[in-house]
Image: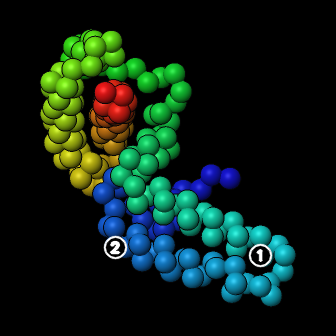
Amino acid sequence: MTSDYFEFYELPETFRPDEAALKRKYYALSREYHPDFHATATPERQQEILHLATLNTNAYRTLSDPDQRMAYILGRHGLLEEGKQELPPDFLMEVMDLNEQLMELEFEPDPEIMQRVENDVKDLSDTLDAGIEPVLAGYEGLPVDTRPQALQQIRTYYLKKRYLLRIKESLTKFATRS
């Protein structure tokens, strides 16, 4: 059974939840659904409490982490289906140079090139973050009919960030080798 974490926490779907409210809700429900307080309940009720406690933990874990929260929201709207993760051609052209430099690094480690690629990835990442921030911050206030457009922008951002993360991971591997 997949539950709506936002509904479970009585929160609107948002990319920028009130962190303190999220934490308060988590702790309140942790106390309410703590198995020790339901030791004398029927086995069925104990099972239900266990389910709710698990749901609470999963909801908090997902909603308190910005990346997991983003993936969760996109997934809820069917925007992260396997095999449909195409990136915009302009972005792929932009990172093609980075990928070529990565391939060179694989055969010939060069701290200078590594540093340059790291800086380029960071710059790209910062630009992406700055560009998406107003969309993330304003999402909750958008009229329902304009949300799909915002979600498409966020999806593209998410896929680009994942791609850059893979490049960063490759750089880390090269760094540990040299």
Query: Where's residue 84, x and y in %?
Result: 47, 23
The label shown at residue 20 is 2
* Residue 131 placement: quadrant: top left
149 in relation to 90, above or below: below
Q: Quick one: 140 or 133, which is closer to the camera? A: 133
Q: Quick one: 139 or 67, which is closer to the camera? A: 67
53 in relation to 110, above or below: below
What residue sits 19% from the left and 35% below the top? Answer: 122
* Residue 112 placement: quadrant: top left
The label shown at residue 7 is none
Query: Where's residue 21, x and y in %?
Result: 37, 73
Q: Residues within 10 Å of mark 1 (few under 14, many from 20)?
A: some
Tell whether 116 sits left or right of 5. left
What residue sits 48% from the left and 72% below the top? Answer: 26
The label shown at residue 46 is 1
The answer to whether residue 128 is seen in the rendering is: no
Query: Where's residue 155, x and y in %?
Result: 36, 34
* Residue 50 placement: quadrant: bottom right
Mark 2 / mark 1, whichever is N-terminal = 2
Amino acid type of disc 2? Answer: Ala
Amino acid type of disc 1? Answer: Gln
Do the residues under discs 2 and 1 have CB atoms within 8 angstroms?
A: no
